[in-house]
Amino acid sequence: MDLVEKLTILADSAKYDAACTSSGADRPGKTAAAGICHSFSADGRCISLLKVLMTNICIYDCKYCVNRATNSCRRAAFTPEELAELTIEFYRRNYIEGLFLSSGVIRSPDDTMEQMIGVLQLLRYRHNFLGYIHAKTIPGASPELVRRLGLLTDRISINVELPSEQSLRLLAPNKKREAIFSPMKQICQETKQNRQELALCKKAEKFAPAGQATQMIIGASPETDYQIITLAEAMYVRYALKRVFYSAYIPAVEDALLPARDVKPPLLREHRLYQADWLMRQYGFGAEEILSPEAPNFNPYLDPKCNWAINHMQQFPVDVNTASLEDLLRVPGIGPTSARRIIVARRNGRLGLTELKNIGVVLKRAQYFIRTTDAPARSQLDRETTVRALIDPNVYSFGMEQLSLFQDTPGLRQLPTARDVTSVTEAVEETVLCLASNL
């Protein structure tokens, strides 16, 4: 099997890993879309990466994985020399700016990690490769190998895969909770220690300077959205993760424990999880504020911030000329950048709607929750009008699919779908009335 065949197989096998901004992009005249993804470096630049597996041969039998041991598919494996040469040639031709490397488990976790480390050592030391490298840790690998991998990469990650230990035992019997969270804890500790070393000596080796990340598969198991974001929040706090990536489960293999292959991926649910994740990381929201055990799933028709605002009308209106940064961040239509601009701008005079628009506030949403010099707040907000203004137009682009693939998920609110009405316009009207009366 030649290198082109190997690259085609192993790049295609890597596309289900969501720890990048995208899984593929067309670049006419350069290389195939398969294998090219985009991510962000430690300094914030958007960069193109070669996204590939070391091998898709795997001794594990994770039910959801296209590369599982019992699945019938074409198998291939790079040698460290082959993958290092391929990467450096792409890099020299300016096709890529870095490498995203993961792997199936061949023979054992330690053996697989040794091969991955071999690739990165060849790149860093033989080819003097200075590009960005993101590598996946293999669950169950020894701590020494995790450390060696971290010293060769810019970002290191280990996939949680499933949101609960029960689902992990059921769908990924070869993986253990301790084998995932122990390396996470080690990486967190190594990163803190490395910062101290760099403060004393600038020439000290850097350990994963872009931090660590993880991925959760959404829709393969019956956990609620509340369980998922609670786990994500805990990992951000305990392990100082940079990102949690959410991957809508794509039925690529058949198993009695998984949703049927004709079920659509829960793309809207994935979208809502990313929105909630952003609220936790950038807006100061806690998981328990976004969802609760009593209402454990996202509202498909309102984004999490708008849904929170509608359910906390008593905290509005907010006076933009006196409110704290924390209160401004709670207003739909005001983001971190515009909130900071408001704080600065109001030092020079009181702000009205024109000034807010110039600052970048989305007045279509914010006007229902703020008080300005030229727009005093209404004595009582009209809930139906507010809901109508806040309803997410992107919902219909996701095909109106249900948020969960499991119909008996507790707390899932049954709202109108496209099949219940004759047009999108009627669906909007029906949704507004439902939300206004029940929220």
Image (tube, rainbow, N blue to C red):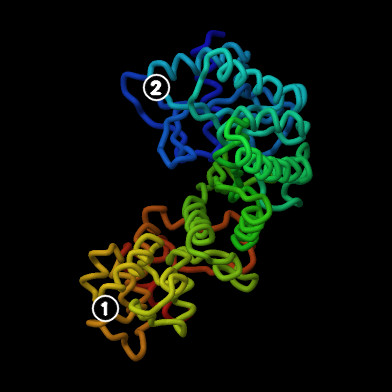
Number of numbered labels in the structure image: 2
Residue depicted at x 37% and y 57%: 394
Which one is nearer the viewer's eye here, 34 or 255?
34
- Indicate which disc residue 95 carries: 2
Mark 2 vs mark 1: which is more N-terminal? Answer: 2
Q: Residues within 10 Å of mark 2 (few under 14, many from 20)?
A: some
Q: Up-down: is 395 above or below 120?
A: below
Q: Is residue 196 above or below residue 54?
A: below
Residue at horizontal 68%, vertical 31%?
68
Q: Nearer the viewer, mark 2 or mark 1?
A: 1
Q: Residues within 10 Å of mark 1 (few under 14, many from 20)?
A: some
Q: Amino acid at mark 2?
A: Tyr
Q: Quadrant of residue 319?
A: bottom left
Percent coordinates x, y for residue 56 in the rendering: 63, 24
In the displayed structure, does residue 269 sit left or right of residue 147? left
Residue 148 rendering spot, x and y as whole percentages: 69, 28
- Residue at the extreme top: 2
The N terminus is located in which quarter?
top right
179 or 154: nearer the viewer: 154
* Marks 2/1: CA–CA distance: 51 Å
- Residue 236 horizontal side relative to residue 8, left or right: right
Q: Residue at x 55, y 48 (%)?
A: 243
Q: Secondary structure at mark 2?
A: loop
Left-right relation of 311 to 387: right
Residue 378 figure quarter: bottom left
Q: Which circle marks residue 350 in the picture? A: 1
Residue 33 occupies quadrant? top left
Q: Amino acid at mark 1?
A: Arg
